[in-house]
Amino acid sequence: MPQALSTDILIVGGGIAGLWLNARLRRAGYATVLVESASLGGGQSVKSQGIIHGGAKYALHGALTGASEAIADMPRRWRACLGSDGELDLRGVRLLSEAHYLWSPGGLAGSLTSFFASKAVRSRVEQAKGEDLPPALRDKGFKGKAYRLTEIVFDVPDLIRRLAELAGDSLLAGERIEPLREGRELAGLCVDGREIRAQRVVLSAGAGNEALLRELGLEQPAMQRRPLHMVMVKAATLKPLYAHCLGTGPKPRITVTTHPTRDGQSVWYLGGDIAEADGVARDEAAQIAEARRELAKLLPWIDLGQAQWATLRVDRAEPAQSNLLRPDNAFLAEQGRLLVGWPTKLALAPDFADRVCARLEEDGIRPSEHAALPQLPRPPLAEPAWEVAFA
């Protein structure tokens, strides 16, 4: 039988939210164990485009929503971590771009009027021209306008690697997770037959929270899934582009990020409205055909004749909302010794950690002495989706 363990905080889920929380708690002196059933970052995290949103895209029609207000400080907090004064040490993590952009195709520039009606939005953007344009837009065929947003773009696989380093010896690969009870009280979890006692258990497993809650005999908090059907384009002719393309609706028409591949080429990873409701309903061939048409309209000077194409379905797991609306903030619920939550988007991982730390403070949970952890089976790092798709 595996050696029993004791820790302050037991975290289930090795995506960026769980890894960020783990690093924050360890830095604060807590003993932690983080359990991952598959690969680190292998759920939603590694499928993210890596944009640290500051809320600009939620105000495309001039209205600063709760989401844009809640997320406004995230680029500053993440950027601070790349230096010496952040809440975590992310120095050395690769940034794909120092800024994300908003671009309007020719003929749609007037649609930006309401976007700039808000003073709060105006303070976060500046127009880009000439050599300040993203390389993919520096063509005489580009007739629109582009604006630089104060939003950085991370190389998500490299970010996961660094957060795994910060975890030290606290990571545990475990497939079978069951409740460990003392009487009717949750005392911890039993992971592949190993008993792990903890002052608090945190479920941050994204879509996996649903099955974990069932295993614990709980129905709440309820979860919703908002699916996406993303598109990947790989070609040697692609130029860097990190941008939301403005459409006529409240969401970006298309969101493009650029990711390097191991063979020296690049992948454009396409989200935005194309990946949402209509895109989810399309099969892979139809979704690729739609992406080809969109890129031919928006960026006709980019040669995609030899490009490789693939799609990726993503389930965004979130706390249930009425009418499947997008949650505005990170979410956390408490039931006895159990904390359950979702960051709701990559950029809000620090907000999720804030909420857990605040709850521990309220409940009087302090770091305590525990025996050193033995060498534990360690979960692997997730493979980037484009490396799998174009292997």
Image (cartoon, rainbow, N blue to C red):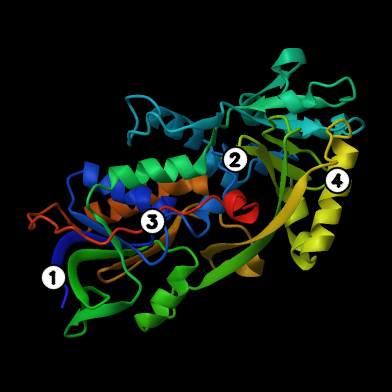
Q: Which of marks 1 and 4 is nearer the N terminus?
A: 1
Query: What separation in Å lies between label 1 and label 3 (alpha carbons)?
Result: 21 Å
Q: Residue at x 80, y 55 (%)?
A: 288
Residue occupied by mark 1: 3
Secondary structure under the numbered disc 2 in the rendered image? loop
Q: Earlier in the sequence, mark 2 or mark 4?
A: 2
Query: What separation in Å lies between label 1 and label 4 (alpha carbons)?
Result: 56 Å
Q: What residue type is labelled 2?
A: Thr
Q: Can residue 156 be seen in this view?
A: yes
Q: What residue type is labelled 1?
A: Gln
Q: Please tell me which residue lies in front, 250 or 210.
A: 210
Kindly report which numbered mark, 1 or 4, lies closer to the viewer in this rendering.
Answer: 1
Neighbour tally class for label 3: few under 14, some 14-19, many 20 plus, Cα within 10 Å = some
Left or right: residue 102 compared with residue 152: right
Say the numbered circle drawn on residue 146.
Answer: none
Dots 3, 4 in contact, CB < 8 A: no
Query: What separation in Å lies between label 2 and label 4 (alpha carbons)?
Result: 23 Å
Q: Which of marks 1 and 3 is nearer the N terminus?
A: 1
Left or right: residue 16 compared with residue 226: left
Residue occupied by mark 3: 380
Q: Please tell me which residue lies in front, 234 or 333.
A: 234
Q: Which residue is drawn at 28% across and 48% down?
A: 167
Secondary structure under the numbered disc 3 in the rendered image? loop
Residue occupied by mark 4: 294
Query: What separation in Å lies between label 3 and label 2 (alpha carbons)?
Result: 19 Å
Q: What residue type is labelled 3?
A: Pro
Residue occupied by mark 2: 261
Query: What separation in Å lies between label 3 and label 4 (alpha carbons)?
Result: 37 Å
Neighbour tally class for label 1: few under 14, some 14-19, many 20 plus, Cα within 10 Å = few
Kindly report which numbered mark, 3 or 4, lies closer to the viewer in this rendering.
Answer: 3
Q: Which of marks 2 and 1 is nearer the N terminus?
A: 1
